Image: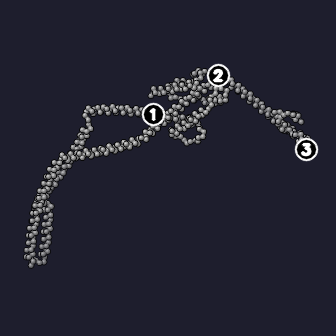
Amino acid sequence: MCPHWSCNAPSSTLGGVFWAALPSPAASSLENGLMPIQVVIKKIEAKVHEQVKVCDMLLHQLRQWSQARDERQRHLQELQEAEVDPKWQEPQLQTIRQLGNDIEKMLMKIHSGEMVTNLYLRLQEVLRRELVYLPRYLDLLCGMTVMYHEELRARSSLKANNAIKKLMAEAGPQVRAEKQLRDQSLAEQRKHIESLRRQEESERQQRQQAVSMLSEEQDLSSSDVLVGADVEAAKAKMQREAFVTDKMEKAKSALQCSRLWDIPSSIEAQRRSLGSLQQHIDECKERKTELKKTLEELELQQAKLKFNEPVSTTRLREEELRQNLQQEEARLEQMRAQMSKSQKRLIEFENIIDNLYLLLQGILIPGQQDSAAVVGLEEKLQECEKKLQFLKERLAARPEDSTDEHGETFAKVRTLLEKRTAEETRNLKISFEDEEAMEDDTLDFEDEDHDYIPSREDIKKQGLQLIRMNTRRRKKKQ
């Protein structure tokens, strides 16, 4: 039998296993009764071998655990020695100072960004208010232009009417004399025409009586002889004579002549009268054009007399207008310079907001869903404001920094800093546009004494001084 069976108290590591593996006396008695002794011995030996294997495995694990404990104790001793050694503390303190400097600079940038955003929003509100009133001003100006246009048209029409009245008043006596002459000539022509018509009527009546008497005599004489064919010839002759006389009477009445031999002279007289009338019409047209030109010249002279002032006053007025023009040009240049500066500031502000938005892009606010892509400047400002407010709340809710170097938080920070410095090949610093400022940077801790550790107030003062120096250099360059 195995010697372990005689042990009354099992060991802490292996005894429990053996105790669970050993059979009870009742079971062994039964097996002894049922099975042969050799089979029982083989089973017991197999169980013993299994327990020995388990014991060897546990001993191997115990040796491994003891080796790991020794290595950890040795590593702990090295870390304690590194904490005491100043060579290991100096780079850590330097990284801590640099991180503090970066944090202060970032806070200053955040503060300046908030100020610029507030200024931009105020300016935008002012411009919106101005835009509200601009349509009213435009409507007022449109109404004034329409009113001035109507007044100018009324004045021009009044001037034209007055000029026409003046011309009519000046040309009135001449027009009356011409009208009287025309009336007299027309009256004389009418009298002459009436006398001619009376003469024609008397001559026509005499001719008709003579023709009637001749026709009666011919009828009486030829009634007996020419009864057949002569009647038709006489009728045709009479019709021709009547047609010719009718035509001649019409020509006389049209030409206002009493005799046939007066027709050519009357036609020539009418031609002369038509030529004289056409000449008179042309002369009237020429006089009309001349009168129009004189009217325009008079209007120009009136405008000059109305609006032109004496020489002395015009010179003073010209000097005043030149001075006002120079002042307005200076104001225009100043406004253009201000506009260019404001545009530059706006572009810088947009770049700062874009950079800040990219820096804060990795910060996720709990309870807020992922929004769509932010495009506008106001949306970016709102998003940055929310994230900065969240960071402020987290910073306020954070417990105060403990000065205990052996504390848990200090150990976590130290391990995090060691990990960051091991991963990064260089320290992240804020790059300024001025190279001289980078050379004269007072916050470069590489050349400083490592024994001096600046406080947060010192770092803030140095940062403000550096910002003032940079702004002065930029102003000098501009």
Quadrant in which the N terminus appears: top right
The secondary element bearing badge 3 is classed as: helix
Q: Is residue 336 left or right of residue 318?
A: right
In terms of sequence position, does the residue under pointer 3 or pointer 1 come before the other?
Answer: 3
- Which residue does the numbered mark 2 point to in the structure image? 86
* Residue 387, position as x, y percentages in the image: 56, 36
**What type is the residue that disc 2 sits on?**
Pro
Left of 446 or right of it: where is 229?
A: left
Q: Locate residue 241, reporting x and y percent.
A: 12, 68
Question: From the image, which quarter does the C terminus lie in?
Answer: top left
Where 262 falls versus 478 (above or below)? below
Whole-angstrom CA distance, mark 1 to mark 2, is: 52 Å
Residue identified by numbered label 3: 34
Q: Quadrant of residue 136?
A: top left
Foreground tag (3 vs 1): 1
Q: CA distance from mark 3 to mark 1?
A: 108 Å
